[in-house]
Amino acid sequence: MRSRITLPALAMIFMAASPAMGQNINLAPNGNPIAPFGQPLVATMGETFTAPSPTNVLQSFQFYLANNADNGGNGGNLLFEGYVSEFNTTNNNLVGPLLFQSAVTAGNSADSYIPYSFNTGFLILDPTKTYIAFLSASGLTPTASTPYAFEAFSGTDDTNPRGMFVYADNGNDFSSLSSQDAFSPLGGDAAFSAQFTSTPEPSEFLLLGSGLSGLVGFVRVRRNRATIA
C-alpha cells in the first residue's frame, strides 16, 4: 500500500527545512538628502553593519538615491557599483578582499528617491565582525564628460544600532578605500535595508530532500488517479 502524504504535511516539512529569517535591517527613507554622491564629488558612500546571529547570511541590500538636481546634478549619467566588504571601525577603511561586487548600474535621473537593490546570493558573514555595504562611482564616471553627475542619498528617521553612514572622497582611486581613514562618518544613517537568513544545518538539507521525495510521490499518485478516472 502506497503511503499518502497530505499537503499540510508537506507544508510542515518545507517550513522546517527552510532557513530562518530575522533581524533584518530596515531603515525607511524620509526623503531628505544626506549628501551628494558621485563624480567629481564624493565617489563612495555606504552603511556599516554587523550580521545578526544566527541569521548571519546576507542575501541582499538596498539604498535609495535621487538625482541631485538642486546642485545641477545629472544623475542619469552617473555609473556606480554596489559592494560588500569587511570594515575596520578603528581605521575606517576596507579590510581584505571584496566580498561582493555588483554589475555596473546607471544612476537615477528623477528627483524622487528610488531604491537600488543588490542580490548578494548566499554571503556568509561573521557576526563578530563589522562590514560595510556601499556604492562607488570610482573609476566609472569620467569627471571631464559628466562633471555634475551625482545623486543624493536619502536619510532615514530610523536608526541602525549596528552601524552608521560613512563616505569617502576618493575620486577615481578605488584602491585608496583600503587606506587608513579612507572613510569619514557623517552621522546618522542612510535609507538602507539588508536581508539576512541562517545557514541551513546538514539535517535540514536531509529533511528538505525527504520533503521533495514525498512531493514527487504525491504528484505521481494524483496523476495515476486522474488517468484511471
Image (cartoon, rainbow, N blue to C red):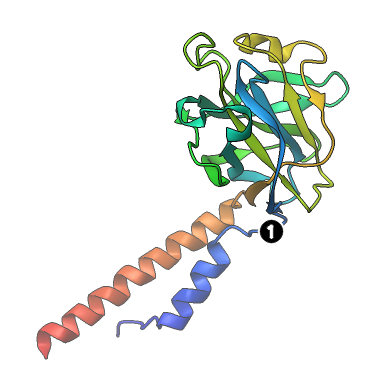
Q: Is residue 105 visible?
A: yes
Q: Mark 1 points at which residue?
A: 22
Above-or-below relation of 160 to 152? below
Secondary element under disc 1, as helix, strand or loop, is loop
Of 70 and 121, which appears nearest the observer?
70
Q: Is residue 77 left or right of residue 216?
A: right
| Furthest-left residue in this view | 228
Horizontal and vertical percent position of residue 201: 61, 52
Horizontal and vertical percent position of residue 139: 54, 13
Which image quadrant: the N terminus? bottom left
Q: Is residue 10 left or right of residue 39?
A: left
Q: Quadrant of residue 132?
A: top right
| Furthest-right residue in this view | 90
| Furthest-bottom residue in this view | 229
Q: Residue at x 57, y 51 (%)?
A: 202
Above-or-below relation of 223 to 62? below
Of 140 and 97, which appears nearest the observer?
140
Horizontal and vertical percent position of residue 212: 39, 64
Q: Is residue 68 visible?
A: no
Which image quadrant: the C terminus? bottom left
Of 109 and 26, which appears nearest the observer?
109
Neighbourhood count class around disc 1 (C-alpha, 10 Å): few under 14, some 14–19, many 20 upward = some
Horizontal and vertical percent position of residue 145: 47, 12
